[in-house]
């Protein structure tokens, strides 16, 4: 995989310029690429009108673990892969699969690791997973819609955030990872905030931290397991059969990478996994080397060890 560009003042200025252009494209509802004009007016309107806010105690989601699964249309088990790519890079992989096999085409769902505001600070040139989505797609129009406002205005009483979810269908991807315009293709964007474990772990004396740490980590894991189950349940109920996930909440929110990987596995690949047959393809888009290895150890331990032994990487 090509190395990602370094993040410095020049890069930030470039990302800010790209973000500004993406906002103008959504305002104009059209853009040109290699002499072709792409009209986004209907797509932006449909996405905005069809976006759905699921409050934390939504009755249609509560008790998801005991509800009858909706199995995928494929007779094969879910194909799960861990790739060292960005979220949009993984969605492009799925789009290319569908281009080569039109009969297999299905919707592509992407988990957006959202923060407290639509798109985070993408318009200021900052970069993160959610900011790359806002900068490279028409998602911002939906994130700032009436349903989006309900989602972002929902007060979170603690650092645990809430189980609130915003589902935005048929968002147009208009850029590649380098920020270049490209022909549009569609993804369904599901936004949800992870537990902010960094803030949950309140400072104190070393003795008090040691005494509280096990209890706190257990509560964090329980909250994350419930939230991640709800995320998959919404994808399942919306009949999104090809999903891009990742190391949800392990960056700024400081959730343990191994814990997050194990929760995904318990939900998707374990013998009694609730969503074992709910999807056709699941891609874990991972960008950090150590995070990538941690996920490989959970989902393909034998293959992971062979891969890293051969590469000479720790």
Image (cartoon, rainbow, N blue to C red):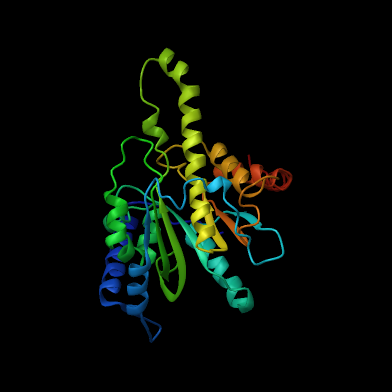
Up-down relation of residue 53 to residue 179 (above or below): above
Judged left or right of residue 172, residue 153 is left
Q: Nearer the viewer, residue 70 or 93?
A: 70
- In percent of width and height, residue 171 lies at 41, 68
How many numbered marks are there? 0
- In percent of width and height, residue 131 lies at 36, 56
What's the residue at 67%, 66% (across, down)?
74
What's the residue at 28%, 67% (across, down)?
23
- In percent of width and height, residue 76 lies at 72, 62
Rendering quarter of residue 150: bottom left
Judged left or right of residue 133, residue 228 is right
The C terminus: image quadrant: top right
Up-down relation of residue 240 to residue 199 (above or below): below
What's the residue at 43%, 64% (across, down)?
178
Up-down relation of residue 313 to residue 213 (above or below): below
What's the residue at 48%, 62% (across, down)?
88
Q: Is residue 119 visible?
A: yes
Q: Nearer the viewer, residue 261 or 124?
A: 261
Q: Is residue 289 visible?
A: no
The N terminus: image quadrant: bottom right
Up-down relation of residue 167 to residue 260 (above or below): below
Which residue is the extreme one toward the top?
A: 207
Which residue is the extreme one toward the bottom?
A: 35
- In percent of width and height, residue 42 lies at 35, 79
Q: Nearer the viewer, residue 291 or 196?
A: 196
């Amino acid at each position: 995989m090509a190395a990602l560009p370094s993040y410095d003042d020049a890069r930030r200025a470039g990302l800010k310029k790209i973000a500004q252009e993406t906002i103008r494209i959504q305002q104009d509802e059209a853009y040109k690429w290699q002499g072709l004009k792409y009209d986004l007016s209907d797509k932006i309107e449909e996405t905005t009108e069809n976006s759905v806010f699921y409050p934390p105690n939504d009755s249609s989601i509560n008790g998801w673990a005991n509800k009858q699964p909706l199995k995928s249309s494929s007779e094969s088990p879910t194909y799960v892969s861990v790739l060292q790519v960005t979220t949009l890079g993984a969605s492009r992989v799925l789009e290319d699969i569908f281009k080569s096999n039109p009969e297999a085409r299905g919707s592509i769902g992407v988990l957006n690791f959202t923060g407290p505001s639509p798109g985070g600070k993408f318009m200021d040139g900052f970069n993160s997973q959610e900011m790359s989505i806002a900068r490279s797609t028409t998602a911002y129009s939906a994130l700032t819609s009436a349903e989006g406002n309900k989602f972002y205005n929902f007060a979170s009483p603690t650092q645990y955030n809430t189980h609130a979810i915003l589902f935005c269908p048929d968002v147009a991807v208009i850029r590649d990872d380098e920020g270049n315009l490209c022909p549009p293709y569609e993804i369904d964007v599901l936004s949800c905030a992870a537990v902010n474990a960094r803030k949950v772990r309140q400072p104190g004396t070393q003795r008090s931290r040691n005494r509280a740490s096990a209890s706190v980590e257990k509560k964090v894991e329980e909250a994350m397991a419930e939230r991640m189950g709800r995320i998959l349940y919404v994808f399942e109920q919306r009949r999104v059969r090809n999903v891009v996930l990742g190391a949800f909440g392990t960056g700024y929110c400081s959730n343990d990478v191994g814990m997050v990987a194990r929760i995904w596995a318990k939900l998707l690949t374990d013998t009694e996994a609730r969503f074992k047959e709910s999807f056709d393809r699941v891609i874990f888009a991972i960008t950090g080397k150590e995070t990538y290895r941690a996920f490989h150890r959970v989902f393909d331990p034998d293959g992971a060890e062979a891969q890293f032994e051969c590469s000479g990487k720790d």
